């Protein structure tokens, strides 16, 4: 199984996306990393790194999704610092997290297949 980390500038947004993804794929390991250490809007490399470590427990790697701007930069920095296998998915946050969570429960899931599943959400139409 592959773990997921949802990075957002808002802790509540990250937790909400984790709730939605978890509802769609109950067996997936999905961890929120939103906001700063003191609860403000923003992102933290340390919080993201801790979430990657948490999501890696019992998994074969971690795919990280982020909302925008510095969240992407900090997520990529946390991935570089991680001592576990991790990859960034360039995908819309909600749709990508749901796609990845559902795919992550499959027996043949790999780090690359889950990243690709998340990134396939870029082409989803809402109408």
Image (cartoon, helix red, strand yellow):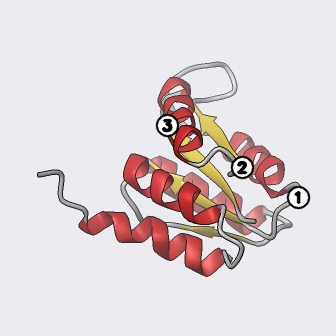
Q: Within 10 Å of the Cα at label 3, are there few (<14), some (14-19), or many (20+) other Cα atoms?
A: some
The disc, 1 or 2, on the residue closer to the chain's N-terminal end is 2
- Give the spatial CA distance, label 3 vs label 2: 13 Å
Residue 105, quarter of the rendered image: bottom right
Classify 17 as above or below 74: above
Q: Where is residue 37 in the image (x, y as percent from the top left)?
A: 69, 27
Q: In this view, does 74 lie to the left or right of 66?
A: right
Q: For this view, does 97 lie left or right of residue 112?
A: left
Q: Is residue 52 above or below residue 60?
A: above
Residue 58: image tag: 1
Residue 20, label in figure: 3
Q: Residues within 10 Å of mark 1 (few under 14, many from 20)?
A: few
Q: Which residue lies furthest to the left in this view?
A: 127
| Element class at badge 2 | loop
Residue at image mark 2? 29
Question: Which circle's residue, 3 or 1, is located before the other in the chain?
Answer: 3
Q: Position of residue 91 (x, y in %)?
A: 40, 62
Give the quadrant of the N terminus: bottom right
Let me know if residue 87 appears in the view.
yes
Q: Is mark 3 on a helix, strand or loop?
A: helix
């Amino acid at each position: 199984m592959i773990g997921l980390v949802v990075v957002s500038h808002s802790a509540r947004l990250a937790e909400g996306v984790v709730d939605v993804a978890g509802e769609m794929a109950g067996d997936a390991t999905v961890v929120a990393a939103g906001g700063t250490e003191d609860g403000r809007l923003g992102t933290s490399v340390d919080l993201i790194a801790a979430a990657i470590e948490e999501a890696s427990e019992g998994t074969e790697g971690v795919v990280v999704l982020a909302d925008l701007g510095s969240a992407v930069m900090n997520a990529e920095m946390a991935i570089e610092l991680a001592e576990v296998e991790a990859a960034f998915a360039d995908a819309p946050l909600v749709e990508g997290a749901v796609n990845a969570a559902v795919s992550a429960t499959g027996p043949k899931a790999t780090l690359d297949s889950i990243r690709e599943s998340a990134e396939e959400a870029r082409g989803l139409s809402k109408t």
